Amino acid sequence: MPPVLFERELLVPRDPGRASPLVDLERGLATQLEPGDVPIRLAITSTSRECFRCEVGLLSGWDGLPPPSLFRFGHRPVENADSFNCVLLVPTGIGSEIGGHAGDATPVAALLAAACDTLVTHPNVVNASDIIDLPSNALYVEGSIVTRLLMGSVGLQRVRNNRVLVLLGHHEDELFTHAAINSVNAARASYGLAVPAIARLGPEFEMEATYVGSGRAAGKVRGLGKLMAELEDFSSAFDAVAISSQISVPPGYHAEYFESHGEMVNPWGGVEAMLTHAVSTLLNIPSAHAPMLETQEIANADPGIIDPRMAAEGVSLALIQSVLKGLQRSPRIVTEPTAMNHHGVFTAADISCLVIPDGSLGLPVLAALEQGIKVIAVRENRNLMDNNLRELPWQDGQLFAVENYWEAAGVMAALKAGIDPASVRRPILPAPVKETRE
């Protein structure tokens, strides 16, 4: 069977007495997956005392070298306090109020970048079709690599310039292929992007967007083997890969999406994340995907004045420029343990805090829990996930629930200054006094 990417919903039992939910997840998934199915992405959509309800992105039929385990964990021995560094996540496809559309969390990234020395974030936060405004101290990192960074299994090495291989999906209308190629050449001419080649994929590579039980955006990818074979043909000629291809959606979805005024979950992002998780996991390279419009009718349609969060999608034809610019300096992925100890490699030991939408739960949050990394959960960034993060076994002072990203920046400033964030609030309660036993 040729390799395929798809999603399954699974209930994973919990052991309330266990301090490590990661162990519950790894053991629970291992007993439920079919032989040959490899998890490459995981979202916990709701939590009860008895179980985690999970939606799992699976790679099936893969006969190449097995990818690293999603649950490979390396405990950080120390926290590096020489700098204050933040990971900003807005998970793709969960309908976040901020960051759920076209790069509309970029101002949040700029705000939080100003409050730290290095900001690690991922394409869903800053990609806005042909617009991207990445803070100068930010690292643009594919989502699965952010997870592995927090899990302590990879490090990041800053680069000056990546060679970005571009893969273009098959399209019946050459207008869209030409628009993508012209975008690549514009990047080469205007900001010096290094592109060793543009490779065109055959029609057997297909991406289909769907929604799953929780309402999250997900999908299915067929023809992954052909894509991986194309990458193998270029061997060591590239450092990162940009992919642009059509994503099938039911008729009328584009109009419905723009007419929803931000209420409809972006249908394209979920399956894009599934693809890039697979590519980056299998090859340990930065990757990102941009959708191709399906027809000139869609391209020429006038959506009117649309929700500002969607506007970047409404004014772009190729939708790929943010991917190219982001990948230009996306950090190299370091997996060799000795190299991860190099002073120039950014690892889990360098992470001071993780900022997430409240209620969103997956491996990054559970890794932060295990690593002792402080987590700031933002209530205002509402989303589809139904998890009470306060029920996890946090250390005292590890989880901060705030109303908005202004408050998140304030908590970060307090942590960076080395003070208890509660000390700047009132009332301030006396420290508890505990009598010693006789």
Image (cartoon, grey):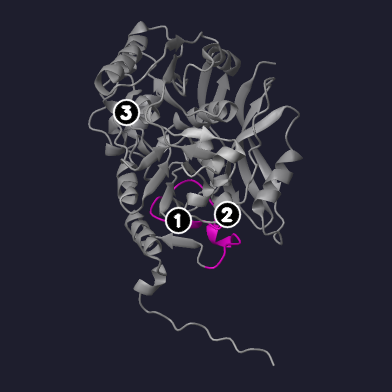
Residue 117 percent location from the top left of the image: 36, 50
Q: Earlier in the sequence, mark 3 or mark 1?
A: 3
Q: Does residue 387 show up magenta in the picture?
A: yes
The amino acid sitting under disc 3 is Glu
The amino acid sitting under disc 1 is Ala
Q: Is residue 176 left or right of residue 213?
A: left
The foreground one among 311 and 349 is 349
* Quadrant of the drawing holding the N terminus: top right
Marks 2/3: CA–CA distance: 37 Å
Marks 2/1: CA–CA distance: 17 Å
Residue carrying label 1? 377
Residue 337 percent location from the top left of the image: 61, 40
Marks 3/1: CA–CA distance: 28 Å
The amino acid sitting under disc 2 is Gln
Specify few, some or many for label 2: CA neighbours under 10 Å numbering under 14, 14-19, or 20 or more: many
Residue carrying label 2? 371
The foreground one among 20 and 14 is 20
The answer to whether residue 157 is visible is yes
Q: Earlier in the sequence, mark 2 or mark 3?
A: 3
Residue 189 percent location from the top left of the image: 26, 17
Q: Secondary structure at mark 1?
A: strand
Magenta region:
369-396
- Please tell me whether residue 239 is drawn above or below residue 153 in the rendered image: above
